[in-house]
Image: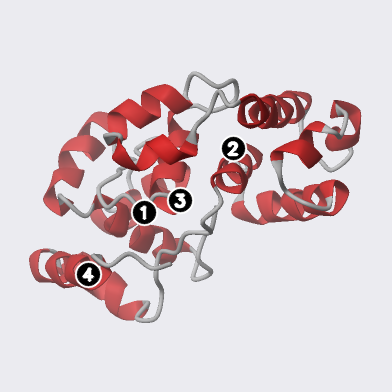
Amino acid sequence: MTPRYWKRAVRELSERDPVMAGIIESHPNGRLRSRGDPFTTLARSIVGQQISVKAADAVWSRFESRVQTVAPESVYAVEAPDLRACGLSGKKAEYLRDLARHFIDGKLEPGRWQGLADETLIAELTRVRGIGRWSAEMFLIFHLLRPDVFPVDDLGLQRALCLHYNRGRRMPVTRMRKFGQRWLPWRSVATWYLWRSLDPVPVEY
């Protein structure tokens, strides 16, 4: 599913920011898409924490083969040592099993989430072990397709801002937050294109 707001967001971002317009023009066919599966999206965000996209894809492939069906029951049925054999750290293996248990026990209720404000949902998700703010933001972007999430802790976003807007120098997080206001209310879309400027293959969670 592609967001209905995408064309409008692209048009407005291009009109107000020449640098962003050039990035968008270089990637005319890309779109943010949702997998439509909240458990898979959260599980992928845990797997992808603090490793490269390529490494995360390799670990996820092994993880998917091991559990066969990426669903709470099948993931929880696999013991932590077997999950670690997929290339996961011990903590990530524990986090994935804990996430599965939250879904099985009904402690996480995806049916409620569409109606929650971004910060309210982030606060709820980050109560789960292994889900920090970055993982929650990836969920808002890639599952709920929220239009205005700006994940300043994301390394790819930091590199892209450094490259395109700060002459190759690191941009402090406080300045990143202020800088990103130029893209309101489409910061998720701007972030997606900044990721594309570093890697033409779309990231998916």
Disc 2 from disc 1: Cα separation:
20 Å
Residue on which disc 1 sits: 145
Q: Nearer the viewer, residue 30 or 106?
A: 106
Label 2's element? Answer: loop
Give the amino acid at mark 3. His
Please report contact status of discs 3 and 2: CB closer than 8 Å, yes or no.
no
Q: Nearer the viewer, mark 4 or mark 1?
A: 1
Label 2 or label 1, whichever lies nearer to me, is: 1
Q: Are marks 1 and 3 in contact (CB under 8 Å)?
A: yes
Above or below for 47 versus 91: below
Q: Which residue is mark 4?
A: 10
- Amino acid at dot 4: Val
Position of residue 134 measured from the top left corner of the image (x, y, whole percent): 45, 35
Would you name the residue on which mark 2 appears?
49
Mark found first going from the N terminus, 2 or 4: 4
Mark 4 / mark 1, whichever is N-terminal: 4
Residue 166 in view, yes or no: no
Other residues around mark 4 within 10 Å, as few (<14) / some (14–19) / many (≥20): some
- In the displayed structure, 101 sits above or below 188; it is above
